Image (cartoon, rainbow, N blue to C red):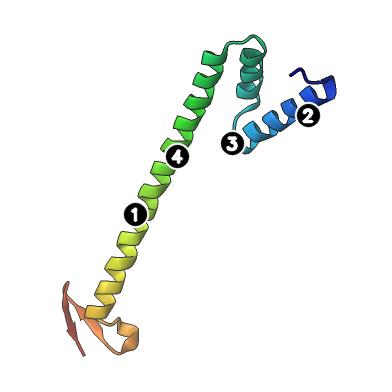
Amino acid sequence: MLMGKSEECSEERALIQNMEDAGCSTDEIKLFLEYKENCRIKEALALLSKHRSGLLDQIHKEQKKLDCLDYLIRKVQMENDCCPCACAGYVRKGKSECKE
């Protein structure tokens, strides 16, 4: 089924918006549209896959930061359970001993 000019423009605007929402750069969007216009679908898909891979790498890096913070939170909570801090009337002595 052939689309009219306004439908094509609307579809292209939606595609561009989707790519912007996905964090694609202006250059990536232009290149993708060029590939698509010239029926170079493999290249267009490779470009999207590369961008997706970059996003996934960012997610993994951010997940590692969250894991580090979770570890630190658990460590501080465990230390506090074992040895209440000085502001609660205790003085920390050594690594695991507390003295009132």
Q: Amino acid at mark 3?
A: Ala
> Which secondary structure lies at badge 2?
helix
Q: Position of residue 68 (x, y in %)?
A: 33, 55
Q: Earlier in the sequence, mark 3 or mark 4?
A: 3
Q: Amino acid at mark 4?
A: Gln
Q: Earlier in the sequence, mark 3 or mark 2?
A: 2
Q: Place residue 53 in its image quadrant.
A: top left
> Which secondary structure lies at badge 1?
helix
Q: Position of residue 32 (x, y in %)?
A: 61, 19
Of the pair 6 and 19, the residue shown nearer to us:
6
Which residue is found at the position 28% from the left and 77% from the top? 80
Circle 2 is placed at which residue position?
Answer: 10
Of the pair 30 and 65, the residue shown nearer to us:
30
Gap between marks 2 and 4 measured at Cα: 31 Å
Gap between marks 1 and 3 measured at Cα: 25 Å
**Viewer-side label of 2, 4:** 2
**Viewer-side label of 1, 2:** 2
> Which secondary structure lies at badge 4?
helix
Q: Amino acid at mark 2?
A: Ser
